[in-house]
Image: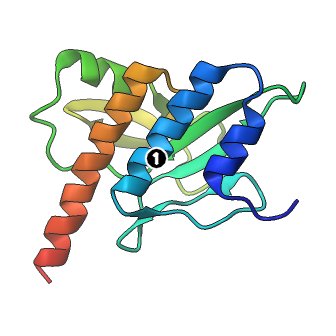
Amino acid sequence: MSKKRIEDAINEAYKVDKDAQKNALEFVNYLQANDVEFEESDSYFWHPKYKGNEVFTINLELNEDGLGASLDTFVNLLPSNSDSWSEREKEVIWANVRPCEINGCGDCSPGITKVIIGKEFNNLCGSFLGIYDPNAETVECMKKLFDGIKCDIDNASHGK
């Protein structure tokens, strides 16, 4: 496979579910509009970076039938401020928490404890949030999550 831009891969992969395609493109376009850089990929994995910091891992998981895909976004960073999150936004993020399911799978085994937007979770994977094929509401929460991470990175770079 030749290297692809993420938006080209999304446009090619979503042949049936145009709502899922729209949501995936909206999230990627939002990141790009906020100075997140995506390198072309030949493996359907992208590691978008903001000011040199990887903010997410994005995997485009192709369906076996070749008619669709799932945009899987893995989160390893959290914004430091969780004061502005509504209860509904928190619920959306908490619904995507990933437990460590495989003993010996990596550095996180047998699981880590993490406070995610004000709530403590135990036995989590190192990539503690896994957002699979987000709907429009979840995309809005993902944007807010990124905005907080971006703010933290900007604040840290101003302190140097």
Q: With 115 as the anchor, is 160 left or right in this view?
A: left
Residue that numbered label 1 is attached to:
29
Relative height, residue 130 to residue 9 (above, below): above
Kindly tell me whether residue 104 is visible in this rendering.
Answer: no
Q: Residue at x 76, y 36 (%)?
A: 13
Q: Position of residue 78 (x, y in %)?
A: 30, 48
Q: Residue at x 61, y 30 (%)?
A: 21
Choose between 114 and 17: the one closer to the eye: 17
- Which of the 4 image quarters holds residue 64? top right
Q: With 153 as the anchor, is 52 left or right in this view?
A: right
Circle 1 — which element? helix
Relative height, residue 36 to residue 29 (above, below): below
- Which of the 4 image quarters holds residue 65? top right
Q: Position of residue 48 (x, y in %)?
A: 50, 60
Q: Position of residue 14 (x, y in %)?
A: 72, 30
Q: Residue at x 24, y 65 (%)?
A: 153
Give the residue type that dot 1 points to.
Asn
- Location of the C terminus by quadrant is bottom left
- Location of the N terminus by quadrant is bottom right
Q: Residue at x 55, y 60 (%)?
A: 47
Choose between 53 and 20: the one closer to the eye: 20
